[in-house]
Amino acid sequence: MEYETTLRHERKLGIDEGRKQGIDEGIDKTIVKSALSVMTKLNVSAEQALDVIDVPKSDQPKYLKLMKEKA
């Protein structure tokens, strides 16, 4: 019985982690899409676009990398 309880607990942890990862990836895609849209509409640099959509300076390198991969 203890083994089954451990398996259920591990499965729940895996599901929770997968959900969080999916949410994080969705947020990343939304930020990249928004920044690219701002760049196009306002004719600004990637850094300026991230500033416009209020991405913290500490997170901007991550999104700049994702934007380069998208291009």
Image (tube, helix red, strand yellow):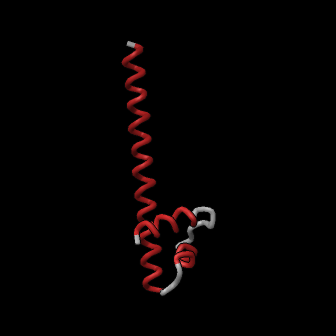
Looking at the image, which residue is at 44% across and 41% down?
Answer: 17
Q: Residue 69's x, y, as percent?
A: 43, 66
Quadrant occupied by the C terminus: bottom left
Image quadrant in which you'd find residue 50 = bottom right
Q: Residue 26's x, y, as percent?
A: 40, 58
Q: Residue 54's x, y, as percent?
A: 56, 71
Looking at the image, which residue is at 38% across and 23% down?
Answer: 7
- Disc count in the image? 0
Extreme residue in the top direction: 1
Quadrant occupied by the N terminus: top left
Looking at the image, residue 11 lies above or below residue 23: above
* Foreground of the two, 44 or 34: 44
**Left-right relation of 51 to 11:** right
Looking at the image, residue 63 lies above or below residue 37: above
Looking at the image, which residue is at 46% across and 79% down?
Answer: 38
Looking at the image, residue 27 lies above or below residue 67: above
Looking at the image, which residue is at 63% across and 62% down?
Answer: 58
